[in-house]
Amino acid sequence: MKIYLSSLIGLAVFVGIIAVAGAGIADMRYRNSEQQLIVQKKAVERAAVLCYALEGFYPPRIEYLEEKYGLIVNRDKFMVFYRTFGSNIRPEISIHRLFSNLETFDE
């Protein structure tokens, strides 16, 4: 009976360690994904402001920033909403993470 109880306790401790490690990995993935989202948004904003500073207008489309300013948008991971209100008004920029069939909210 002692051997059975100690084996059960050992198994419970092992499962607990695996659960804590898994939660830590999921948290790191989420934080990394959030950081990528922030970096992508800042890149779009910087390119738009640079275009305004150099050319005197905000471009009507994000594709202009990709073509002329070398902006790289990771369209596999993010959807970028770029809405202009006029060539002299800063555009509304929002970035949203895409989830594939293999990804979950925990990742």
Image (cartoon, helix red, strand yellow):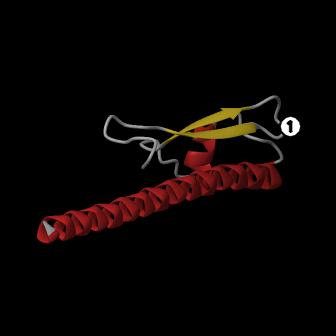
Say which quarter of the image contains residue 92: top right
Name the residue located 43 percent from the left edge and 37 percent from the top edge: 99
Along the viewing direction, whichever of 68 and 95 lies nearer the viewer: 95
Name the residue located 47 percent from the left edge and 48 percent from the top edge: 74
Q: Give the secondary structure at mark 1.
A: loop
Quadrant, the N terminus: bottom left
Specify few, some or many for label 1: CA neighbours under 10 Å numbering under 14, 14-19, or 20 or more: few
- The percent coordinates of residue 57 (x first, y second) are 81, 42
- The percent coordinates of residue 76 (x first, y second) are 41, 42
Name the residue located 71 percent from the left edge and 55 percent from the top edge: 46
- The percent coordinates of residue 45 (x first, y second) are 71, 50
Work out which residue is located at the far right of the displayed protein and give it.
88
Q: Which residue is mark 1?
A: 89
Rendered view: 51 above or below 17? above
Work out which residue is located at the far front of the displayed protein and give it.
1
Along the viewing direction, whichever of 9 and 18 lies nearer the viewer: 9
| Amino acid type assigned to the residue bearing label 1 in the image | Ile
Say which quarter of the image contains residue 23: bottom left
Along the viewing direction, whichever of 54 and 44 lies nearer the viewer: 44
Name the residue located 26 percent from the left edge and 66 percent from the top edge: 9
- The percent coordinates of residue 93 (x first, y second) are 70, 39
Left or right, 99 with reference to 35:
left
